Amino acid sequence: QWNAQLRRGLVELCVLAAIERDEAYGYQLVERLRQGSGLELTESTVYPVLSRLARERLLDVRTAPSPTGPPRRYYRLNAAGRARLAQMKQHWEAVSQSIARLLTGEI
């Protein structure tokens, strides 16, 4: 489906934006993202992206005890992650404005 492909292409932008202001552990991040209508991102989508972003050194990760269950991994944007997010935001703005112009017949 085209909408699933669109979401897949936007996962990284959404994950980075969701932790821009403060750190979050994986499930907490999934819950934040579920608040966005149309995103419908699941754990099986978000966790691999978090792992990849951490491997690419765009996120800092710390482990802390959980009140229940196993320890939690908390993710936070570092300087490289903030730079990537800024680039992605800039590109998203340009693309979304162009699409809006196409949809309204301006282009």
Image (spheres, rainbow, N blue to C red):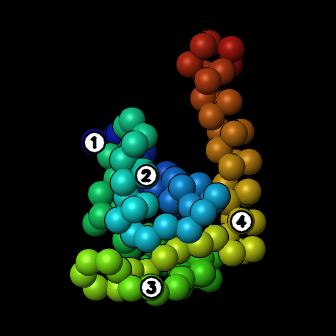
Amino acid of disc 4: Arg
Relative side of 48 to 77, left or right: left
Whether residue 8 is visible to the viewer of this picture, yes or no, is: yes
Q: Which residue is mark 1?
A: 1
Looking at this rendering, what residue extends furthest in the front direction?
Answer: 67
The x and y percentages for residue 85 are 67, 59
Relative side of 93 to 30, left or right: right
Q: Which residue is mark 2?
A: 32
How crowded pointer 3 is (Cα within 10 Å; few <14, some 14-19, many 20+) is rated as few
Secondary-structure class at tag 2 = helix
Residue drawn at x 73%, y 57% as measured from the top left: 87
Q: Sequence-wise, which precedes: disc 3 or disc 4? A: 3
Q: Sequence-wise, which precedes: disc 1 or disc 3? A: 1
- Which mark is nearer the camera, 3 or 2? 3
Q: Is residue 88 above or below residue 96?
A: below
- Which mark is nearer the camera, 2 or 4? 2
- Which mark is nearer the camera, 2 or 1? 2
Real-space CA distance between mark 4 and mark 1, rounded to the nearest whole angstrom: 31 Å
Secondary-structure class at tag 4 = helix
Q: Which residue is mark 3?
A: 64
Q: Nearer the viewer, residue 87 or 68?
A: 68
Amino acid of disc 2: Arg
Amino acid of disc 3: Ala
Q: Is residue 78 above or below residue 103?
A: below
The x and y percentages for residue 23 are 56, 68
**Quarter of the figure that contains the C terminus:** top right
Q: Which residue is mark 4?
A: 82
Real-space CA distance between mark 2 and mark 4, rounded to the nearest whole angstrom: 19 Å
Residue drawn at x 46%, y 87% as measured from the top left: 63
Residue drawn at x 65%, y 39% as measured from the top left: 95
The x and y percentages for residue 99 are 60, 29
